[in-house]
Image: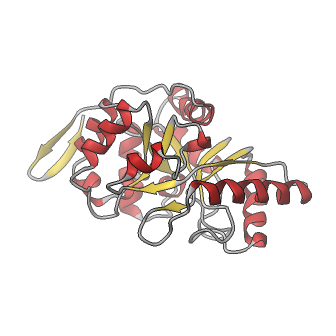
């Protein structure tokens, strides 16, 4: 399995704080069947900057530590990039990393409560540059919970979305769990990732989440999540089915 969203690099953000923490996360991932992790430290979120050069150096250093510890896990560079006005400029200048540093996919983080006014324009600009935004954990954004049509519109513009394993398992709360299930069933998310931060409550594990996926959709569609994760890492094309329509009724949204 491939984990596209993980805060495993030690000391870069609110994820692993020490090398020992990071190595324990790696052991947990391998035991779960994960072979590859994209390290995605928080970037340009007002707290952490994590420019490309620093992340690339950290990935190289940590991969050496994994090899020394005989942990069979491959680490790839990436970033969880918070929405900001210079988003595209920083990508094109090489200051901010895309997934695998391949300039094909970028993990885009929204605020928890809202959607910035310039987000639609940002997604369009990324598509023009041939970069596919991956909307990180949309099930945890309050505005998208209330109006999932916004996510459907972004998918129509070329974006894809990543649901968090912990949300499907109920570890992010009941509301996030129910929203994640609906988004899976209505084809509003396309890859699953751990968004792991530690070796405790937010662990780098995907196996159980894939089993939940298989209970929500048919086998072919559940398998597609793994195929899409591989495509993202390799810079290929994901399979994106048309989202189910969402309609508003009395200020609540219903899927059909």
Number of numbered discs visible in the structure rendering: 0
> How far across and how far down the image is residue 122, in percent?
31, 44
The colour scheme used to paint the residues is: secondary structure
Tell me what residue is drawn at x 28 percent, y 54 percent: 145
Q: Would residue 187 be visible to someone looking at this image?
A: no
Task: Identify the image quadrant of the C terminus.
Answer: top left
Foreground pick, 214 / 71:
71
36 on left or right of 175: right
Depicted 185 relative to depicted 12: above or below: above
Q: With respect to residue 200, does 234 lie above or below?
A: above
Residue 45 spot, x, y in % from top left: 42, 65
Residue at 78% over, 49% down: 73
Q: Is residue 72 above or below residue 220?
A: below
Examine the rendering and report whether any part of residue 232 can be seen: yes
Relative to 28, 39 lies left or right: left
- Measured as percent of width and height from the top left, residue 228 is found at 55, 32
- Outermost residue toward the front in this view: 93
Asked which quadrant contains residue 242, the reply is top left
Task: Report the residue at 64% width, 60% height from top.
Answer: 54
Q: Estimate the x, y position of residue 144 in percent, counting from the top left.
A: 28, 52
């Amino acid at each position: 399995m491939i984990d596209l969203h993980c805060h495993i690099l030690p000391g870069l953000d609110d994820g692993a704080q020490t090398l020992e923490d990071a190595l324990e996360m790696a052991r947990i991932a391998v035991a779960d069947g994960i072979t590859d992790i994209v390290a995605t430290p928080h970037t340009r979120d007002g707290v952490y900057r994590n420019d490309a050069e620093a992340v690339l150096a950290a990935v190289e250093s940590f991969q050496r530590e994994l090899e020394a510890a005989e942990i069979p896990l491959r680490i790839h560079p990436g970033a969880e990039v918070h929405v900001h006005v210079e988003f595209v400029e920083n990508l094109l200048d090489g200051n901010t990393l895309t997934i695998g540093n391949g300039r094909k996919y970028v993990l885009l983080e929204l605020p928890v409560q809202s959607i910035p006014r310039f987000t639609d324009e940002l997604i369009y600009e990324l598509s023009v540059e041939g970069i596919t935004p991956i909307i990180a954990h949309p099930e945890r954004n309050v505005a998208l919970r209330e109006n999932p049509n916004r996510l459907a519109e972004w998918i129509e513009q070329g974006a894809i979305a990543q649901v968090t394993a912990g949300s499907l398992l109920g570890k992010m709360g009941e509301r996030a769990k129910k929203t994640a299930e609906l988004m899976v069933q209505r084809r509003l998310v396309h890859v699953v990732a751990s968004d792991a931060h530690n070796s405790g409550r937010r662990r780098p594990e995907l196996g159980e989440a894939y089993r939940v996926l298989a209970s929500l959709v048919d086998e072919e569609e559940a398998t597609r999540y793994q195929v899409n994760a591989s495509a993202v890492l390799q810079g290929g094309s994901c399979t994106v089915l048309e989202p189910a329509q969402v309609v508003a009724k009395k200020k609540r949204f219903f899927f059909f």
